[in-house]
Amino acid sequence: MRSEPDSTTTAPSARRQRDLIVILVALGVAVVLTRIVGQVTRAGGIPSPVVQVLAADVAVWLPLGIAAAVVLRRTSRAGMVSRLRLDLGIVVFAIGIVIVCRAVDVVLSIAFTGSTGLVPAPTLGPPDVGLLVVSAIGIVVVSPVLEEVVFRGLFQRRLAAELTPRTRFLAVLVTAFLFALLHLLLGAGGTTLGGFQVFVTTFLLGVLTGTLVAMTDRIGGAVLAHVLFNAVAVVATWPR
């Protein structure tokens, strides 16, 4: 099968529009599957906590992974790998993104709850190390990589190619909005204020990582920022 050129701007507009629709459908399927898994779990259908976490993760990873595979099947693999590259400037920018987003998250958390939210959760007895490890791998490794490939690497890139040079910035904002909305619909936050906090923080993360991708045409910095952003929360809340 012939691969398309590295730049999506050379592909037919119909193909880009199809790719955007595929990704949007995948996001909707992820939300539906997550709701189904949640209902089954609450009904006692998945008794094991580890399996509960894996099922919830797979409910999101499966449709996003399929969408990425469909969209990428005509894309140059070498071109995609090259967009994962990092250099010192991108690393510094990524770390700055994490600092800004975590600072905003802490400020909102203190305003809403009086706590930073980055403290270990109380546990009764020894923590389930297996559950913690499985959760951490999903949160710090798999989800950030997959989400950045789908949102910034594919959706934003193709949406930007559909817009004019003057309106191309909207691709960053629309992608960041969908990114934040997905996290909100997946149940992040738990409460109204918590959901608002998650939406604002993830939207800001999406805008900043999307800007970095638009500036460099690489997603490596976005992946790094997302990984570090999630890692801070995992390390800070890990049971002591």
Image: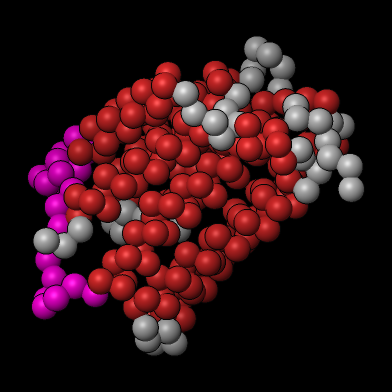
164 on left or right of 225:
right
Query: Quarter-wise, where is residue 204 in the image?
Result: top left
Q: Is residue 100 magenta?
A: no
Q: Position of residue 158 (x, y in %)?
A: 70, 33
Instruction: Determine whether 90 is above or below 120 in the image.
Output: above
Here the colouring is secondary structure
Marks counted in the figure total: 0
Q: Residue at x 37, y 86 (%)?
A: 47
Q: Position of residue 172 (x, y in %)?
A: 55, 28
Magenta span: chief secondary structure: loop
Instruction: Determine whether 10 is above or below 139 in the image.
Output: above
152 on left or right of 180:
right
Towards the viewer: 64 or 129:
129
Which residue is outermost to the top?
Answer: 166
Towards the viewer: 21 or 91:
91
**Residue 124 appears in the picture as rendered:** yes
Q: Residue at x 61, y 55 (%)?
A: 64
Q: Position of residue 150 (x, y in %)?
A: 60, 45
Q: Residue at x 46, y 81 (%)?
A: 40
What are the residue bounds of the magenta stretch?
107-128
Q: Is residue 123 magenta?
A: yes
Instruction: Determine whether 17 is above or below 86 in the image.
Output: below
